[in-house]
Image (cartoon, rainbow, N blue to C red):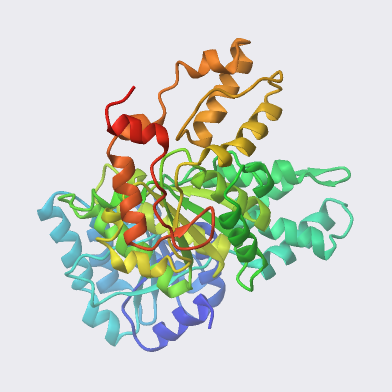
Amino acid sequence: MNYLESIAASLDRGYPFIAVTTQDYPETVAALVGALQDRPVLHWDLPRGAVGLNELGVESSDAMNSSNEPATTTSKFEECLERALDLMPPRSVLIMDDVHLILDNQDRVIRAHYIQAIRNCREMFKSSERCLIFLCPSIQLPLELANDVEIIDVPLPDVVRINARTEELMEAAALPKPDDATKKRVADALLGLTAFAGENALVKSFRKTGIDFDDLMGRKKAYIRQIPCLSVPPSVSTFDQLGGLDAIKDYGRQIIAGKNKPRLVVLWDEVDKWIASLGDSNGINADALGQLLGAMEDNGWDGITLPGFAGTGKTEWAKALGNEAGGLFLQMDLGGAKGGIVGDSERMVRQAIAMLKAMGGEKVLFVATCNDMSIMQRKPELLRRLAYGVHFYDLPTADEQIPIWDLYIERFGIPDQTPPPCEGWTGAEIKKVCKLADEFGKPLAEVAAHITPVVTTMGDGVNALRDQAAKGSWISAKTGNPYTKRPPTANAVRKMKGIQ
């Protein structure tokens, strides 16, 4: 049953209030008018008041408005409902825009006034088969109305609809009929966008020879960046470009070759820091976590946890996974969902989750990185959903650093020279030295003298994290086996004994 059939069924059962969550108001209104031709259909917004949308609806709006300018009579929300209660005929439907903003009014008396205006309609609307349909991008109903309103979601365009529209638009532009491969690429690019946004992006990417897919994906990424929780970081990495980490790279290839090859890889970076903020007094972060966990459960989304030292390649592995899977790589920051109006933050999170679902379907994989697993363990319900395991990124050994040095020396065109001593350095620090050596035209050793590695800044935290990994039997990203703490190096032993 599609959403229009669900709405029609609810109307036939006498539901007086329906909240329809949609990302495209005009398209949804047009679809409702087409599906409800046997009912008077009216549409209300603040600038225009209540206006009839079909012949029966025009008769109803004429009855509700005392002049030829509906906005002079019915633009005020509560007055419109009062007149609808008395003057709208049986089986009428009044579609109302952005009621969620009205119900979020921070003046409690005004808010109560709006809630009561809606509730006063319930019994008479039910008995006369009339209905208020509230259009909103997402909604969190006040407790006073939570049991009275049915919520129906309008899905974003799916592959079938995108394919059909692609054929229509390309034919209208006198372009060759798209083959299956072209339609798949277009669908991958447009999933998650409204029909209006997707069609605009597609048409603007048309060229005389066909479709400019780089331009199309660029437009898709621009739309994604409008959602505060999501971003599209630069991502060109492949597993072959990562030095070391053989086991976790092999595991990534197994994920890609599996039956649930991810269509969308979502990096959730430094999750431990975000979880530590869950005690916020307004409950926004706790609500966000609840929404995400519910979506992961409902859609069968999986994830993997990557604890370890900063700069050891966790983020680059996630980027490489997204690239090699052939899908899209996004970064999620739930802490970025901070709105200035009550309810804004919750709507931002719900909008982000809706886009993830539209783009990835059931094939979304979360990569959660962290530096302190003890904080992650406060939320076992989250770890349970990150079912691909806990893989620990230790500091690379001297032998493991060799391919990393080779990789970046070649990438930055460093003249042949011996790398400086760098016990405990991360891949990110080695990359930084090579980049600066190329930029300054200086030897590696001279540049390295200005770098303070994470192994130094963390101090005792290095051993603490390794102890945690060994006790928790996390999987080593290097070996693919349960992690065992490595013995201290000779230099470390000398430092512990105070020998310089």
> Looking at the picture, how far across and down is residue 10, in whole percent?
40, 83
Left or right of 395? Residue 401 is: right
Callout count: 0
- Residue farthest top in this picture: 441
Residue 455 position in % (x across, y down): 38, 34
* In the image: residue 76, left or right of residue 434: left
Camera-nearest residue between 251 and 204: 251
Q: In front: 344, or 331?
A: 331
Name the residue located 54 percent from the left edge and 78 percent from the top edge: 2
Residue 151, compared with residue 197, is above or below; it is: below
Q: Residue at x 81, y 55 (%)?
A: 170
How far across and how far down the image is residue 80, in percent? 28, 61
Q: Is residue 213 visible?
A: yes
Give x and y (percent) for residue 369.
Answer: 42, 50
Q: Quadrant of the C terminus?
A: top left
Q: Is residue 36 visible?
A: no
Image-based side of 155 in relation to 274, left or right = right
Residue at 38%, 42% in the rendered image: 488
Q: Is residue 295 left or right of residue 24?
A: left
In this rendered view, identify the residue nearer to me: 116 or 179.
179
Is residue 424 or residue 410 the one in the foreground? 424
Kindly give the residue lying farthest to the left in the view shown: 109
Identify whether 341 is placed above or below 70.
above
